[in-house]
Image: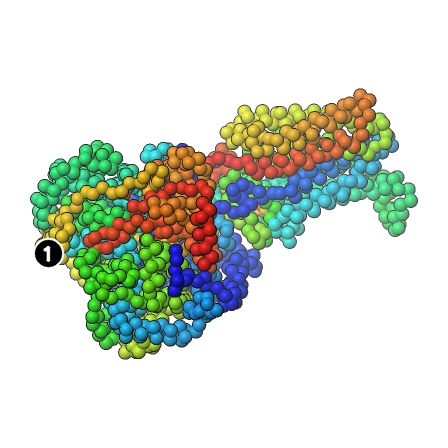
């Protein structure tokens, strides 16, 4: 028999017997960030493709959620900090090697950008909107003039934000489940899929809806590819990663992952969207809700299961 | 267990409530160590802080150390004293964690007196004067009615000296400690009868220079007696061979070149076989044996039949291994130690087993040799002058005529027996003072202990903690911890004579007082003022220290002082004539003393009981981070080890279908069920015929907030006691337990009662 | 200068003194610790081997905890000692998640804490508290760049292993076997 025990010390809550330094806050933060990234990405990209007036839901409506999501996400991150009064320390330095650092900076950039973006469209949406002060009108005009620049910056930063939500975890060598380069693209894809889904729910434009439904289907396909690839990668890797993958292949996270994330969060909504595209009458809110649900579950499960995966002695 | 006159009382009521408020602010401050400015918290600023000398009281190795206080004047840490040979500047985990004794908020805080209120017995807070009055009156009455000899003092630890003085002045010689009949008594008696000298404490084993160390059920490394642990490590570094005989894969076994996984209770057979091999192969130290020993021829005849092949069937140790290890010892001789162990009260023939150990050492010539056993020396510190003690009219030997004739100290369990009224006894003990020993957990056969307590007219308990024994007291006196007091000079026998001072690092917390003060005040209450002609302990210590060329002021500064050896060398010089303190003046392989008292002059093998089917031998021992029950509520050490676990062999676990970490109850051969459940640790380190647990857990007093109900008590399951007829030791290893995965209902309700009452 | 520690598993008895001494020296609150003891038993009775390891932060030469720290609170000091500056730490937990050895813990006051190699003592010319207290003298601390330091000599004389090297951390605790 092999017996390995810690006979004293280290049995700190949060670290032992299982690491659980990160809870729902980080999972939510990643979800909100990913969704906001998806929304802003499609908004700026569609704008650059000259769809400003065709895809109004994409360019004007959906981004309204982004600042709210980002602020909520930041709020969750703040809640997660154990040393809250020192929060400002995040912004006294830039640490390029720390995803946490450039994530914080990305948010610092993209949150005001998203607010400005929304502001430049607010009078398109609410024609009666009154900025009250003259200089605000001047600022608005300034940004409307440079919307294109704004859009370019936002495409770039929203992509970074999307990838960041995955990289934050995959940078951790110590947690075999997170330690895969697929996590970045997977989270980016899943953020985009959520973004597309929200647009599908919001739009009244048939073309726009069909377009984003198709996009969503493609992204879900890509996500499934990533997931399969991820497990193949794990299983072909070291013992620790094989053990990590086992959490989903018979281990304690098997049912939640395959049922909530893959089946309910991807396969079912993909099927529904597909049928809908084929002309079946399906209330659009159902696949959208399922996709968002799957998105949340993916973040939660990866955050928690990652902490349960560890190096063996 | 039924008790009438003396019900177990939970210390409770208003007083404790009030104290608890104080206690919670205290925990507050303890847990807020890290509060305040967090600047420099992870890397504290270097500052010079005050430190005072002490010696450790967490076990009886008594390492000298320094207590350092932090910026706020609170005790911060205790570190070993570099000049002290007991510790060489390093305390063991218990000594390091000793600060927890001081900070423990469950400490006794105020004298308590048992009173009857509305037909119910409760403890009432009292002033020291009131408490002394009650004790004084009772002791005077006992003296009057039965004679002062009917008072006994059980004491373990430093304060015993002062209380002992008080008791002797009062007229009773009956001072006893569990360190004899529950601990090292058999070994001392065996070595006295062989070499005319004991092994003493600290043991005179020259481990650091040995080339072969043989440990027989002595688990140094778990038994954290500091100097020995350090020297064993040094010996490992120097490449010494370690041979460990232990049915359990002890830590020491894992460091050994040879581990002999002996069948429990059969060590005598192995020892005799070793003697047989060493004599028949002529591996013994011939000049040494010839010059110094008596009875070699008788021994040679005696051991003829004890061959390795004979021992194999008994011990399950292969003859080849027995020869090989004997060879290993002989090769190393005389730098070899067959370690006599310390807690050696196992099977009732312990003195004889230790005689075999002594004989083996004698044959290999290790007594008085480098790397074997050295001759220790100590200074003689005169006692502060006092009138002679009154002559006692009777002693414990009169109370148990013809029993334990070779005991060199008073037998604690003998006092216990002599307290229980019986038609034969001419006189019984009527009053006990119990200081620093938790008899409920310390003496085996709890039923008997409780019966004795029940018969007492007075039970005074002096302790620092609300341990189980306090619940039976008439008067509880709270002693302050060793960090808050002066004590007697530690004067230990060692390679060089060395003394050490304990002084208070801080004022006593609560209304607790040191033993020296308690003894003095109680003495005055008893009208023994003539014996206490000094203002305070400082006067006594200073006087004593000045007699040996030091002073209190000096010792306060240096803490430890070494002296030159006065007599002989550390070891025998080659060919030196030496008169041993035995009847024959020789090392007695054949013990004339044993023979004269009607015992086997040379050890013989007797088989011991084996576990019946479905039962396992209850094996117990030390855990490195705890000392018996005294540390079981210490916040720092509880953090390291909160409870004891039951070691179970995987085969046994499989048979029972029990899982790692599962809690089980134990039932012994006498149907006694453990009060609490114990967590199973499935491990290969234990044999399939035994289970193992650390001694000192399973406390039933709820006032011990951290220790209550944590783990199980081995003591309550030790009801089959094998008394050593030679010296009265209590053999405790013939108890067998079976596992209960569920607590039977009847037992459950009883447990509830003992816990609640 | 490259500080490192060697731990002689042949002498360690797993007594946890190093843990207690560290807690007191560094005022680590009860319930937390900077070092810990692992016990490994292999084999079947009576063919057994047992190893005790006193573990703590490995002061990795390639420290993921420092890399992932967003504020620079986790940093490397002279001698390769990995430290956390409490006033810079926001308690985000990234470093805790990044350490393959689980050597860090969130201090109840919010910041993250870990073994400092007792740099406050070392700077005064003393040894770390755990090294100073160990009753079996099985911990060796010193400068690997100095060939005469205790660690350098032990590592030269003895076989050793390092833990989880596959995590790429280049750990600086050497377990003598
Ligand atoms: N079942 C079983 N019984 C055993 C043993 C065993 O292994 N198993 N071992 C035996 C051995 S070897 C020995 S030596 C004995 C030890 O037996 P004891 O010395 O009785 O052991 P402890 O349980 O430590 O009890 C010490 C008591 O002293 C108190 N105390 C601690 N510090 C102070 C102090 O400074 N002042 C005062 N006044 N009190 C203090 C503690 O609170 C506690 O109540 O037990 C023996 N009995
Ligand atoms: N940490 C710590 N250290 C202590 C103490 C403490 O409380 N805590 N107490 C101190 C005191 S007072 C004493 S007396 C000593 C006692 O310490 P020791 O004398 O070293 O040890 P014991 O408790 O007698 O023995 C326990 C060992 O005996 C083995 N054993 C059990 N049955 C048999 C058998 O039949 N044959 C053989 N050969 N071995 C057997 C057990 O498996 C176990 O390994 O420890 C001292 N050191
Ligand atoms: S061995 Fe440990 S507990 Fe015993 S006196 Fe020394 S430091 Fe104290
Ligand atoms: S103090 Fe030394 S012997 Fe004890 S556990 Fe720590 S490293 Fe091992
Ligand atoms: S052991 Fe962990 S905390 Fe220490 S340096 Fe390495 S990664 Fe950082
Ligand atoms: S918890 Fe503190 S030290 Fe750790 S990564 Fe965050 S800021 Fe850095
Ligand atoms: S080096 Fe200092 S901080 Fe690190 S484990 Fe040892 S005592 Fe603790
Ligand atoms: Mo003992």
Up/down of B111 relative to A102, above or below: below
Q: Position of residue C113 (x, y in %)?
A: 53, 49
Residue at 36% x, 57% y: name it: B440
Residue A155 as seen in the image, left or right of residue A99: right
User: In x, y percent, where is residue A282?
Assistant: 80, 27
Q: Residue at x 34, y 47 (%)?
A: B670
Q: Residue at x 46, y 67 (%)?
A: B119
Colour style of the rendered protein structure: rainbow
Q: Nearer the viewer, residue B703 or C19?
A: B703
The spot of residue C75 in percent (x, y) is 55, 46
Which residue lies most toward the right here? A128
Q: Quadrant of the N terminus of chain A?
A: top left
Q: Quadrant of residue B435?
A: bottom left
Q: Provide the secondary structure element on which disc 1 rests.
A: loop
- Which residue is most to the top? A278
| Percent x, y of residue B178 | 30, 57
Residue at 28% x, 73% y is B145
Residue B685, quarter of picture:
top left
Q: Is residue C81 visible?
A: no
Chain hosting mark 1: B
Task: Judge the density around disc 1: few (<14), some (14-19), many (≥20) Cα neighbours within 10 Å.
Answer: some
Can residue B297 be seen by looking at this rendering? yes
- Residue B561 or residue A137, whichever sits in front: B561
Name the residue carrying label 1: B583
| C71 or A35, nearer to the observer | A35
Q: In the image shown, does B10 or B145 lie closer to the viewer? A: B145
């Amino acid at each position: 028999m092999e017996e390995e025990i810690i006979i004293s010390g280290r049995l700190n809550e949060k670290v032992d017997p299982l690491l659980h330094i990160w809870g729902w806050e980080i999972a939510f933060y990643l979800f909100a960030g990913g969704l906001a990234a998806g929304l802003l990405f499609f908004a700026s990209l569609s704008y650059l493709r000259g769809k400003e007036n065709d895809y109004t839901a994409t360019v004007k409506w959906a981004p309204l959620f982004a600042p709210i999501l980002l602020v909520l996400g930041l709020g969750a991150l703040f809640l997660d900090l154990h040393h809250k009064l020192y929060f400002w320390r995040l912004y006294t330095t830039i640490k390029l090697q720390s995803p946490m650092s450039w994530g914080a900076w990305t948010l610092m950039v993209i949150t005001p950008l998203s607010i400005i973006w929304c502001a430049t469209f607010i009078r398109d949406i609410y024609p009666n909107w009154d900025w009250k002060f003259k200089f605000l009108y001047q600022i608005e005009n300034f940004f409307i003039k440079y919307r294109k620049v704004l859009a370019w910056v936002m495409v770039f930063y929203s992509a970074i934000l999307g990838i960041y939500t995955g990289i934050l975890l995959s940078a951790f060598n110590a947690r075999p489940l997170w330690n895969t380069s697929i996590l970045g693209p997977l989270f980016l894809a899943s953020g985009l899929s959520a973004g597309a889904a929200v647009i599908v729910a919001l739009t009244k434009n048939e073309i726009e809806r069909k377009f984003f439904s198709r996009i969503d289907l493609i992204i879900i396909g890509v996500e499934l590819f990533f997931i399969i690839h991820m497990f193949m990668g794990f299983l072909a890797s070291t013992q620790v990663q094989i053990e990590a993958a086992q959490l989903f292949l018979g281990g304690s996270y098997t049912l939640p992952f395959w049922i909530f994330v893959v089946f309910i969060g991807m396969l079912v909504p993909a099927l529904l969207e597909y049928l809908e595209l084929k002309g079946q009458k399906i209330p659009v809110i159902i696949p959208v809700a399922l996709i968002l649900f799957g998105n949340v579950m993916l973040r939660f499960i990866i955050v928690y299961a990652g902490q349960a995966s560890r190096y063996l002695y | 267990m039924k008790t009438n006159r003396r019900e177990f009382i939970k210390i409770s009521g208003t007083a404790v409530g009030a104290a608890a408020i104080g206690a919670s602010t205290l925990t507050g401050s303890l847990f807020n160590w890290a509060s305040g400015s967090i600047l420099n918290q992870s890397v504290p600023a270097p500052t010079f802080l005050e430190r005072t000398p002490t010696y450790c009281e967490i076990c009886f190795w008594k390492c000298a150390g320094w207590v350092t206080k932090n910026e706020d004047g609170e005790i911060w840490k205790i570190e070993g004293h570099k000049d002290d040979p007991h510790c060489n500047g390093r305390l063991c985990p218990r000594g390091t964690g000793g600060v927890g004794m001081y900070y423990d908020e469950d400490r006794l805080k105020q004298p308590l007196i048992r009173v009857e209120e509305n037909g119910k017995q409760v403890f009432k807070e009292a002033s020291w004067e009131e408490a002394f009055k009650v004790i004084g009156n009772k002791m005077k009455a006992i003296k009057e009615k039965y004679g002062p000899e009917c008072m006994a003092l059980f004491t373990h630890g430093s304060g015993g000296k002062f209380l002992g003085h008080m008791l002797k002045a009062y007229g009773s010689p009956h001072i006893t400690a569990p360190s004899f009949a529950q601990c090292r008594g058999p070994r001392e008696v065996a070595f006295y009868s062989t070499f005319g000298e004991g092994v003493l404490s600290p043991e005179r084993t020259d481990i650091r220079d040995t080339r072969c160390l043989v440990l027989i059920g002595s688990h140094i490394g778990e038994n954290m007696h500091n100097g020995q642990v350090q020297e064993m490590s040094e010996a490992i570094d120097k490449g010494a061979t370690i041979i460990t005989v232990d049915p359990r894969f002890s830590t020491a076994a894992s460091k050994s070149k040879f581990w002999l996984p002996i069948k429990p209770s059969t060590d005598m057979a192995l020892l005799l076989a070793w003697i047989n091999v060493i004599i028949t192969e002529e591996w013994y130290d011939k000049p040494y044996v010839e010059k110094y020993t008596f009875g070699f021829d008788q021994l040679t005849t005696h051991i003829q039949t004890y061959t390795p092949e004979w021992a194999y069937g008994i011990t399950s140790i292969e003859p080849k291994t027995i020869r090989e290890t004997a060879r290993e010892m002989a090769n190393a001789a005389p730098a070899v130690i067959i370690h006599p162990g310390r807690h050696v009260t196992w099977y009732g023939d312990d003195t004889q087993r230790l005689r075999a150990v002594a004989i083996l050492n004698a044959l290999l010539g290790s007594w008085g040799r480098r790397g074997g056993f050295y001759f220790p020396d100590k200074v003689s510190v005169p006692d502060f002058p006092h009138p002679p003690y009154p002559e006692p009219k009777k002693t414990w030997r009169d109370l148990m005529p013809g029993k334990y004739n070779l005991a060199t100290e008073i037998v604690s369990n003998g006092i216990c027996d002599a307290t229980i009224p019986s038609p034969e006894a001419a006189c019984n003990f009527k009053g006990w003072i119990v200081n620093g020993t938790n008899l409920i957990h310390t003496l085996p056969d709890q039923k008997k202990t409780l019966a004795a307590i029940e018969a007492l007219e007075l039970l005074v308990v002096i302790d620092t903690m609300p341990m189980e024994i306090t619940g039976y007291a008439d008067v509880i006196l709270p002693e302050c911890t060793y960090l808050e007091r002066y004590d007697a000079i530690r004067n230990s026998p060692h390679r060089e004579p060395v003394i050490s001072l304990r002084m208070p690092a801080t004022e006593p917390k609560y209304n607790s007082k040191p033993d020296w003060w308690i003894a003095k005040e109680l003495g005055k209450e008893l009208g023994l003022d003539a014996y206490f002609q000094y203002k305070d302990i400082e006067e006594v210590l200073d006087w004593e220290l000045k007699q040996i060329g030091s002073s209190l002021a000096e010792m306060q500064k240096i803490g430890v002082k070494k002296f030159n050896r006065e007599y002989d060398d550390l070891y025998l010089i080659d060919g030196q004539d030496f008169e041993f303190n035995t009847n024959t003046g020789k090392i007695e392989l054949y013990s004339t003393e044993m023979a004269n008292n009607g015992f086997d002059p040379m050890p013989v093998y007797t088989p011991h009981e084996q576990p019946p089917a479905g039962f396992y031998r209850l094996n117990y021992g030390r855990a490195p981070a705890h000392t018996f029950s005294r540390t079981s509520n210490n916040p720092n050490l509880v953090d390291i080890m909160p409870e004891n676990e039951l070691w179970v062999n995987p085969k046994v676990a499989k048979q029972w279908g029990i899982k790692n970490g599962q809690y089980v109850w134990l039932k012994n051969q006498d149907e006694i069920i453990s009060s609490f459940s114990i967590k199973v640790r499935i491990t290969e380190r234990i044999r399939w015929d035994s289970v193992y647990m650390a001694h000192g857990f399973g406390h039933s007093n709820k006032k011990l907030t951290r220790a209550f109900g944590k783990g199980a008590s081995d003591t309550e399951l030790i009801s089959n006691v094998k008394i050593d007829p030679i010296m009265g030791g209590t053999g405790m290893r013939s108890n067998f337990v079976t596992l209960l995965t569920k607590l039977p209902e009847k037992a459950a309700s009883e447990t509830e009662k003992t816990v609640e009452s | 200068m490259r500080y490192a520690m060697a731990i002689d598993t042949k002498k360690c008895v797993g007594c946890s003194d190093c843990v207690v001494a560290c807690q007191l020296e560094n005022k680590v609150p009860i319930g937390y610790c900077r070092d810990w003891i692992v016990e490994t038993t292999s084999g079947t009775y009576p063919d057994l081997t047992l190893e005790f390891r006193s573990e703590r932060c490995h002061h990795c030469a390639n420290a993921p905890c420092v890399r992932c720290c967003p504020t620079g609170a986790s940093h490397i000091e002279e001698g390769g000692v990995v430290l956390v500056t409490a006033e810079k730490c926001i308690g985000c937990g990234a470093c805790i998640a990044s350490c393959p050895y689980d050597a860090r813990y969130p201090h109840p006051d919010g910041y993250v804490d870990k073994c400092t190699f007792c740099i406050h003592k070392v700077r005064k010319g003393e040894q770390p508290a755990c090294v100073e207290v160990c009753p079996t003298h099985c911990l060796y601390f010193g400068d690997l760049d100095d060939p005469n330091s205790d660690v350098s000599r032990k590592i030269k004389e003895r076989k050793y292993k390092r833990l989880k090297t596959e995590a790429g951390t280049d750990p600086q605790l050497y377990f003598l076997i």
